[in-house]
Structure formats: structure tokens, C-alpha cells
Amino acid sequence: MDVTQPEAPVDRAARNGRRELPPFAAAPVLALAAVFAAVLTSLSGRYGYHRDELYFLAAGDHPAWGYVDQPPLTPLVARAARTAFGDNPSGLRVASTLAFAVTVVVVALMARELGGGRRAQALAAGLAALGAQLLAVGHMVSTATFDLLAWLVLCWLTLRLLRTGDGRWWLAVGAATGIGLQNKYLVGLLVAVLLVAIVAVGPRQVLRGWWPWAGALVALVLAMPTVWWQAAHDWPQLTVASGISTDDGAENRTLFVPQQLVYISPLFVPVWIAGWLRLWRDPALRWARPIAVAYPLLCLVVLAIGGKAYYTIPLLIVLLAAGCEPLLGWLRRGRRPARRWLLAAAVVLTAAINAMVTLPVLPPSALAVPMAMNKEQGEQIGWPALADAVREGWSAIPAGDRADAVIFTQNYGEAGALDLYGPSRGLPRPYSGHMSYADWGPPPDSADGPVLLVRQADNHAVERHFTGCRQVARVDNGHGVDNEEQHAAVVLCSGTVKPWSSLWPSLRHYY
């Protein structure tokens, strides 16, 4: 794509970014958001809960200002969605669908902030909505769902601040940051790279005065409860983050560049490259140059810490929005019909591939190929089957021993499934040492009867904490989906090697 633009005189107002913004393309943008929301709603109940959603529902039943691996916002949203819309995947996912729709609108607003007209705004909204990452997090409730929205809102507010030079926007930036920190601490990384970028390339005047400090105070006040919780619990989030870097850091670094190309769409790469070049070169957008600096800076930081490639996707979406105006210019030049057909083909192909990879459009038995690119598809299959297998194992315990028996699971997905599906199958509350389930208590020491252990097929090591173990059931999701719980073992043990209160610290784990 030819993104070069002829030099033209630029008036002082344009250089300062204070020219009047184009009208907001409300009708096409809201229509796009509604259409995508309708598609997501129609598909939201096709598979089942994701393991993380089961965990969020359980966490929502244990409200707190923080958890070992996350702030409180997503569990609270999950609890509210369940209460308002029903105890089923479709009801829970109303929250993620609404977040998706708002995100689409925010992308259009960013394109407008960068001088994009109605067509550029609608194009930005549509291309972003087709991106694999946005579809994936819009389909189901996750911390990444609301983190993506928080990052993009923060980027939009930052663009307004940079364009207008009005320090009062720092208050909104601070509010967005504080709320974002109540969902995921990664938003602090965005704030840091944006500040460094503004210092590096300007406009530095927005950092002067007391408004930035007022914005920081707003952010601190809003984030303080969860920060206080982390401090009071010895910063467990740092332990979790360190484990991610240690366990997955090398793989994350190896896959980082390829995933930058595919997380939105390989076919849209020229658009966001054009957006980066526009922000860097266009004199009328000199005030927005910090975004062009922030993206590569964020990439370097994520690579250094061994973080996941999707951490940078919000800034890529900003670049995508910036690239829509050059894309429209490219479509107007040269062989216009051929170029329009090329764009249409890219959109259709992207929609087909990303829908298959991120949405429940295929039968569960056909998920092998999508799971090679997005294993989260398979993590929505088989949880009722797991509960059925545990019920089978529970029936192997003599009725007289069940009052003192305990169900113990390897991870929060298994525990969440049994929390949700167990009561209707006559099963007691499950216990687990995984993440915040460990904080919700060990069984009482008086529960010294049999232990029904649920573990993944290859994790025999956990049995060392128990005595007299034998497998009594096996999980089969019925679709041949090779997810983490397929062929999980249900193991009946005669007891524990020591009382639960003494054993519990050894059972706690974060990974």
C-alpha cells in the first residue's frame, strides 16, 4: 500500500491538533456494533463455559478487593451478569458482548480523533471488530475482555488530551486508569510507555501543571482498594506473573512477532503499518506521535519480561484506526474497482478464518484445527461430563463414609465445574489448592475420610499427598476434544498423609 502523502501547507491550528473534528459516524458505527453483538449473542451458548469463566463465577461468590491472580472487577461483573441475565453461558456473556460493542464504538472515536471522516470511522470499527483478539475476548468473559476495553478507552482519552492540550482530560485519564487497574494491573504498563513516549517526542506541555498530578490522584484513589489487598497478602500477583515469565517466557518471545501479525489479521497488517507511518510522518498529527513511539516501546518491554504477545494488541488497534484514512486514499487512487475487490476479499477471508478460530461456529468434534491456533476453543467443552465422572467416582464411596469425604481437584476449572454442576448431581463442595481456591479454605481436619481426587491424566505426582489411591472413573467429553481435562482421572484415595491444615500449604499452587 502506498502510504506516502504529498507535502501540503498545514495551518497552525492543524499543527496544534485543534482543528474541528469530523462528525461522528453514529449510524454506521452503532449499526456495526449492533450486528456484531447480535452474532455474538446468537453463538454465546453454543458450547459451554470456559474454565476461566467457571473460576470467575466462583470468585464472584467470594467477593473481595482482590484475588491472588487478579483484581476484583471481572468476578464482580460475572456475578452481576449471572444475577441479571441467568445462570448459563449466554447470560454470563451478555457482559462480554456489551464490552465488545463499546470497544467497537471507541475504535471509531479514535479514528475520528485522528481526523478520520465518517467512512474512516466505520471502516476502523469494522476492521477492528473482525480482529481475532477482539472476537475471542468478546465471545466470553475474561479479564482480557475488559482490559482491552480499558486500554482503548485510555488511548482515546490520551489522544484527546494530546490533541487539545486541555489538562482537564488528565482527570478522565486517571479515572480510566484506576478502573482499569481494578480489572488487570497490565494497564499500568500502558500508562508507563505512553508517559515515556510523550517525554521523548512531545507534546511535553501536557505534562506541566497540576492536572497530571490530579489525574494520578484519581487513579490512585480508585485503585487503592485492590493495591491495599495485594500489599496485605504479600503481593501474590507478582508470584503469579513471575511464574508466567518463567514457565512461558521463552515460548512467548519465540511467538511474539508471528502473533503480532495474526492477532488482528495477517491481511490487515498493511493497514496498521500505514497507520504507524501516518502517525510518525503526518505534520497534522505530530501531536499523536507518542502512539507511534509507544507501540515499539511496549513490544520491547513485553519481550524483556517474557509477557504474552496479546498485551500489545490494543496499541495495534489504535494503529489500525490510524491507517483507515490512508487505506481510503489508496482505494480512491489507481485501479479503484480492483482495489475495492481486494479489500472486500481480505475482509471476507478474515471474517471466515477468525470466526472459525475464535467463535463456536464448528461442531465440537471438528475443533482440532482451530485449537491448534486457539486452544481456548476446546476449554469450553466437557465440563458437565467431568461432573458426571466425579459423580460416578463419588458413588464408589460407601454411603456411611461420605459425611467425612472430600472432593479435591487439581485446578480451578475442575473445581469451578463442580461448584456449578455438582449440587444437581448430589456432590458436596469441592476444594482445590489452585489460585484463590486455596484462600477459600482447606477442608476441616475432621474431614478425615476418603478423598476423591480429580487430576489431569498425566499428573500422578499429586497423589503423593494421599494414601491408598486407585482410579475409579475417567473423564470423556464425548466429542473427542483434546483439551486439558479430556481423559482426566477420578481417583479414590483412602485419606491424606497428614491433617488437611498441615497439608494445605503443600497443596497450594499458582500454575
Image (spheres, rainbow, N blue to C red):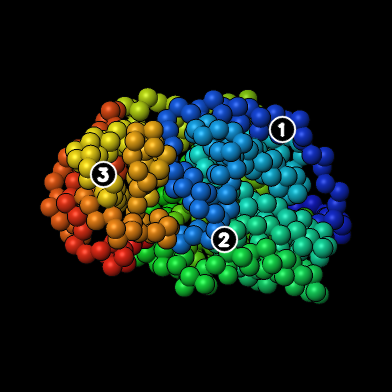
Cα separation between marks 1 and 3: 56 Å
* Residue in the foreground of this view, choosing between 394 and 324: 394
* Residue 327: quarter of image: top right
* Residue highlighted by disc 3: 402
Q: Is residue 68 above or below residue 114?
A: below
Q: Are marks 2 and 3 in contact (CB under 8 Å)?
A: no
Q: Position of residue 9 (x, y in %)?
A: 83, 54
* Residue in the foreground of this view, choosing between 252 and 271: 252
Left of 348 or right of it: where is 424?
A: left
Q: Is residue 458 above or below residue 182?
A: above
Q: Are marks 1 and 3 in contact (CB under 8 Å)?
A: no
Q: For the N terminus, which image quadrant?
A: top right
Cα separation between marks 2 and 3: 35 Å
* Residue highlighted by disc 1: 30
Q: For the C terminus, which image quadrant?
A: bottom left
Q: Position of residue 268 (x, y in %)?
A: 54, 41
Q: Which mark is residue 134?
A: none
Secondary structure under the numbered disc 1 in the rendered image: helix
Q: Is residue 380 above or below residue 204?
A: above
* Residue highlighted by disc 2: 65
| Three-letter code for the amino acid on which mark 1 is drawn | Leu
Q: Is residue 471 above or below residue 231?
A: above
Q: Position of residue 58 (x, y in %)?
A: 46, 47
